[in-house]
Amino acid sequence: MIQPKLDRIPAGIGSLADFEALAHDRLDPGAFAYLMGGAGDGITRDRNRQSLDGLELVPRVLRSLAGGSTACTLFGSHLPHPVLMAPVGFLTVLHEAGEAGAAQAADATDTPMVLSTLSSTPLEEVAAAAPGPKWFQLYVQADRGLTRALVQRAEAAGYRAIVITADAPISGVRDAERRAGFRLPPTVTAANLPGGRALVAGQADRVEDPLGDILREAPTWEDVRSVCAMTRLPVLVKGILAPGDAETAIQSGAAGVVVSNHGGRTLDTAIPSIRALPRVAEAVAGRVPVLMDGGILRGTDVLKALALGATAVLVGRAWATAFAAAGPLGAAWALKVLVEEFAVAMALTGCRTLADIRPDLLETPRP
Amino acid sequence: MIQPKLDRIPAGIGSLADFEALAHDRLDPGAFAYLMGGAGDGITRDRNRQSLDGLELVPRVLRSLAGGSTACTLFGSHLPHPVLMAPVGFLTVLHEAGEAGAAQAADATDTPMVLSTLSSTPLEEVAAAAPGPKWFQLYVQADRGLTRALVQRAEAAGYRAIVITADAPISGVRDAERRAGFRLPPTVTAANLPGGRALVAGQADRVEDPLGDILREAPTWEDVRSVCAMTRLPVLVKGILAPGDAETAIQSGAAGVVVSNHGGRTLDTAIPSIRALPRVAEAVAGRVPVLMDGGILRGTDVLKALALGATAVLVGRAWATAFAAAGPLGAAWALKVLVEEFAVAMALTGCRTLADIRPDLLETPRP
Amino acid sequence: MIQPKLDRIPAGIGSLADFEALAHDRLDPGAFAYLMGGAGDGITRDRNRQSLDGLELVPRVLRSLAGGSTACTLFGSHLPHPVLMAPVGFLTVLHEAGEAGAAQAADATDTPMVLSTLSSTPLEEVAAAAPGPKWFQLYVQADRGLTRALVQRAEAAGYRAIVITADAPISGVRDAERRAGFRLPPTVTAANLPGGRALVAGQADRVEDPLGDILREAPTWEDVRSVCAMTRLPVLVKGILAPGDAETAIQSGAAGVVVSNHGGRTLDTAIPSIRALPRVAEAVAGRVPVLMDGGILRGTDVLKALALGATAVLVGRAWATAFAAAGPLGAAWALKVLVEEFAVAMALTGCRTLADIRPDLLETPRP
Amino acid sequence: MIQPKLDRIPAGIGSLADFEALAHDRLDPGAFAYLMGGAGDGITRDRNRQSLDGLELVPRVLRSLAGGSTACTLFGSHLPHPVLMAPVGFLTVLHEAGEAGAAQAADATDTPMVLSTLSSTPLEEVAAAAPGPKWFQLYVQADRGLTRALVQRAEAAGYRAIVITADAPISGVRDAERRAGFRLPPTVTAANLPGGRALVAGQADRVEDPLGDILREAPTWEDVRSVCAMTRLPVLVKGILAPGDAETAIQSGAAGVVVSNHGGRTLDTAIPSIRALPRVAEAVAGRVPVLMDGGILRGTDVLKALALGATAVLVGRAWATAFAAAGPLGAAWALKVLVEEFAVAMALTGCRTLADIRPDLLETPRP
């Protein structure tokens, strides 16, 4: 039986991971598979976490930490901490508060939110519901005019960056959702798109000819150049795992890259994000910010990503499980605790500011 | 209690692996041991899968995929995809539709079938039941005249290649079958052989002097040369794991080699196929096609084998479990989904055609 | 239901590890979490043990062992064995015999005890209860005058060394204690501190601004220099994992260092102690003794630590679990068996004295 | 409830490992701990097996195997296979047929038996019960005159080699036996020793001063030289893991060495035998035979040991579990199947004789 959503954080909660079980009991099996499922056998999803746990820290002690801070600067904006909310589609599947509620959790924790193209709430309404900094995640649409319209609407609504998702030209092998028989509830639509219709991962029936019709319209680097030309906002490319693709992104005008395997939701056995990060960071060589997502669940994970070259991290399931269990309150709790843990990890490794977080904090800098 | 065979694919099926449990419930324990058991402790059988899962992909994004295709060419024939059905003996043990039914599943999915010498249906009947391309797997018989007759019958019946199995001069240590007390049902015979009699793996009682009588008649490289001389068909040697043996196969006239450990059914702790593949491919250096089998269960597995030098792959348990559970319909479903997954994996790694599948897709090219 | 404490060692006990279950049944869940819990997910706590188990010994045989001994010298004192009791706070949480009882177990086994600043018994009373050699573990207090008073009291009471804990400027992420709702019982106080009040790990509510107020008062290397100047006792710095910090400790006047990750209780995924040890020992290069704690539970663990450069080891949970189950008798049993196992390990590896314990006893000298 | 011993091999038995469960049900817990227990946490016992399983074979195919054989020569004697029965003490604890019954199983399978000093039957009676080739395992006695008498009795009774156990100068940490409360039954004595008294592993109460009294009498290399001088038989030293000790053994007159960690029964976390073997074999460089024991349970294990430099292997638990369950019949069955599996492994890797078993059969020659 599905339990009612929580209206407070239970006493026994120790860390963000504890919310997975709470979300499990408060979502129908399909929605839970949508939230937690990985592509295929979930190997990349699991290895995202395992690879982070596998990295070992070599702390420095007794350094002065007076005046320490987790603050950073990104695209000219000051941020109190280097954690952003990764785009998660159709948030009303997880909690009735939807994208507007998630945006309020973001504001409550000074966390920039990256809103998905596949929002169940129009991007303008989300912006209106919470005034904090927001970015817009862009799925390039088969209709390139529609793509342009989305970018223009986001810019007009005050979104501060465009994040083009590059790693999902086609839905992955979403066995978990298929087994659970996940379908979007009829009340949930892609509110940013005409008619509310989207071809969503796990949603379509099996594709008959994957290398045929659909991929003829798939986004390419030309789309990156085109989006860069149509907006004054910084444009990031999300889903970079190969160093050469980071180079191409910069050459195509990208103002940043996001190392990501889509949370293990598209291509199973893709390399874990944290293992791809140092090589991408090396190729980028500081020319643009390198963000990263995939498995971040602990403050030490944030520290490790920064030590390996990330400017900031995005987190998805880390807050979305708490959101599914306890709505905006849960999401805010999760983000707050994650940042607190990060500050503790800085203190315990002798890092006063983000500039002190260097590769030699890790026993194995190139895992 | 053994459940009745399925006549449709159940709704909850997510991937090929899900059929193992369905087959388990629809076969008697002996037949299930025959289907799934590995030699000894099943270590090589399991490592075939684990080694594939252990390989990590580094996808490329935003490349143009328009006009993409999974097509390939093998021995002058155009194939819509690089997946073949590996030989599996005595298919009527698994499903009453037998080899003819399996051949129809092959045709339905444009998959060449490699028929086993130990077919429970005469090779001519199988060819008549389904007109698609077929190869013939050859166990060299103690009576070399009988060997010649088998080759001639296969050629006459339209089979397009001969695959000599080299890695089973003697039955392996088939503990699983022995524990389950597997015996061929009396109605099942080796229909290609005189009197329907064959010395089948797991079937004979313990061999008293394995290095004595039996091995005196075991096949040698001389038999490869002899078979090459007796037919115009391309002859492949299956069961190659050592690079030097690939060289000898080519010197002996083989038109191709199959990297294989017999699905882990003969020598336990033999090296996993995917780990042996790159060295064999390096030794072959493109002179003949290199095929591979052993553990392929996912589209990404096909991609990995091709990235490491395979021209095509053979799959056995991947369709045979579905065949055991749901007959020809199951086998066809499994093969279709495997090829679809392969196409999705190509799309998600930026491969438009098979020529784009290169070793640098893998984090560790030499696993 | 919580079982009564044991007044004898049960017949079935095989080794120190067996006491964990006995302690589990004799402590309330919060106290057990305080005893056994690690920071975060307990990864470092577990890896401390796993890394020791992973080291493999290459014994030498048939050497003369006549006149062998486990004796060693530390800061000019003769010790019958190189094992010390690590500081454990608030022992009355574990057993009513408290620190005085633990000190008597130390004396019974000729083991120097390191008393925690956070003792629930005044340091003078502990010294009076058992005359054996004792060291004092120092948490630098926000009030530096109080720090000085603690050092002077310890020196006056006959403690023979000061061990400054460097790796806990702030409480770690103590999820296990938080989940179990651990709170110090009202009868337990920090008896060495004015008003019995201490900010104890896991005890405080979530810290709001970890890099702010609290850390302004955190200890630094200046405190090490200051403590060294205020006492004639040898001063050790505990919590060293980075070789560079060992160098700084020596430069700051430390007479020894303790390689430690605080039993995995502060920073999860910190490097296991035994893996950090050889590099620290190399940096120290024999200038001062290098001690080590973290996961020691077997005589072979002691042997391995010494082979990798430790002069002596500290053990915490190894005796504290037995203390929690069976009081001073349990602690004494555990220490006695640990030393016996160590002697057996020396004999079985051909080591007559500690000088024979060299890195080549280990298959992988640098794990 | 303890089940009666078997008088036939059950139908469901697939391999030697299956006997462990049968023995478990037919021995009291103490005797089972004596049979299967390892020192400490059983890590070395388990790793003996895991290291063998971890080695991967690269078979060669289609070589001529006509006239193949498992025969070998050892100390001038022809043996039909390179497997010996390792010494196991007090066999009447396992089965009433005792050492005489085990010796008959040895004869039935042409297996040389190494009789333990701690036999529960006098060595002369064992020799009389079964005429096949036998070696005598020697525990050097505190009374060196008694040592000499044992050697002379063995030589007089027709034993063909003396195997000095070097790796047990003191009983290991036998937690499993201690937990199970194992005690030798009163009817079982050390029949080769005056008064039937022996200080048996796991039997003595905790040793008070392991590096003291007992070790004053422990065997040294001088004893090896002394035994070599007192007999015309070849003398082997058993328990060698360090290459340097192999050199010393040869310098001391040994005619062979046995790479062994005593089945993991003395020093836990000692290096697995198969991992120590190649380095010892390299040091010995063919000057004397190198035997090996530890974890051999499969024909492929024998093959791997020979590939890494062993001339022959000893097996203990491999037959002793079967002996405990089914007496001499069980032991004979186990030895017969092991040799059959070895022959099959030779055939499947293309080895006609033992000379063909070379390191390149292994994927990782130096594991």
Image (cartoon, coloured by chain):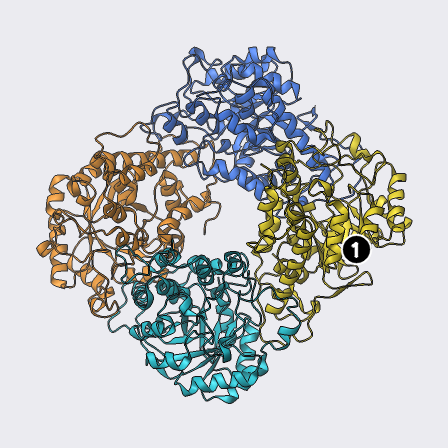
Chain colours: A orange, B cyan, C blue, D yellow
Residue C299 location in percent, x, y? 64, 34
Name the residue located 40 percent from the left edge and 48 percent from the top edge: A308
Res A38 seen here = yes
Question: In which image quadrant can residue C180 be found?
Answer: top left
Residue C366 showing in the rendered view: no
The foreground one among D239 and D62 is D62
- Tell me where residue D151 appears, x and y as whole percent: 87, 46
Tag 1 secondary structure: strand
In this rendering, is residue B360 above or below B134? Answer: above
Q: Position of residue D306 (x, y in %)?
A: 68, 61
Report in which chain the residue with disc 1 lies.
D
Q: Name the residue under label 1.
A: D256
Identity, as a three-letter code, of the amino acid under mark 1: Gly
Q: Where is residue C144 in the image (x, y as percent from the top left)?
A: 46, 19
Give the camera-side residue of D175 and D283: D175
Q: In which quarter of the image is the N terminus of chain C?
A: top left
Residue sitting farthest toward the front: B186
Of the pair C363 and B315, the residue shown nearer to us: B315
